[in-house]
Image: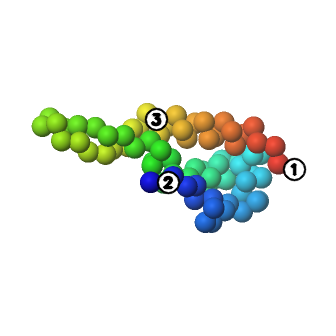
Amino acid sequence: MVKTSPSRKNPLPFPVIAAAAGGNIDAINAVLKHYEGYIAVLSTRRSYDRNGIPFLCVDEELRRRLETKLITKILTFKVA
């Protein structure tokens, strides 16, 4: 399975990116919403139930770490 970013299909509008880089909370939330599915895929892990049967679940700690990293990069992004 190839993990692709949703930005290839439907990129974020430039004004949203510029506002997010400027620290606008609503714009940052829009960016997080745009990438929430991709982040969920990246943070999906295989776990096992009591009977040893595997199942997939989202590692919430990893998901939060990825979101935090994205926010950090948004705030340091230089808009031309």
Instruction: State the residue in front, 54 or 59.
Output: 54
Q: Which mark is residue 49?
A: none
Q: State the CA–CA distance, disc 2 to disc 1.
A: 31 Å
Examine the rendering and report whether any part of residue 18 can be seen.
yes
Measuring 63% from the left and 61% from the top, which residue is drawn there? 8
**Label 1 residue SS:** loop
- Which percent across, then down, holds residue 60? 41, 38
- Three-letter amino acid code of the residue under disc 3: Leu
Q: Residue furthest left?
A: 51
Figure quadrant of residue 58:
top left
- Three-letter amino acid code of the residue under disc 1: Ala
Mark 2 touches mark 3? (CB < 8 Å): no
Figure quadrant of residue 75:
top right
First along the sequence among labels 1 and 3: 3
Q: State the CA–CA distance, disc 1 to disc 3.
A: 31 Å
- Three-letter amino acid code of the residue under disc 2: Val
Residue beneath disc 2: 2
Q: Residue furthest bottom?
A: 9
Mark 2 touches mark 1? (CB < 8 Å): no
**Label 3 residue SS:** helix
Residue beneath disc 1: 80
Residue beneath disc 3: 62
- Which percent across, then down, holds residue 49? 19, 38
Q: Is residue 77 left or right of residue 3?
A: right
Figure quadrant of residue 77:
top right
Examine the rendering and report whether any part of residue 33 can be seen.
no
- Which percent across, then down, holds residue 12? 67, 60
**Label 2 residue SS:** loop
Q: State the CA–CA distance, disc 2 to disc 3.
A: 20 Å
Measuring 45% from the left and 48% from the top, which residue is drawn there? 40
First along the sequence among labels 2 and 1: 2
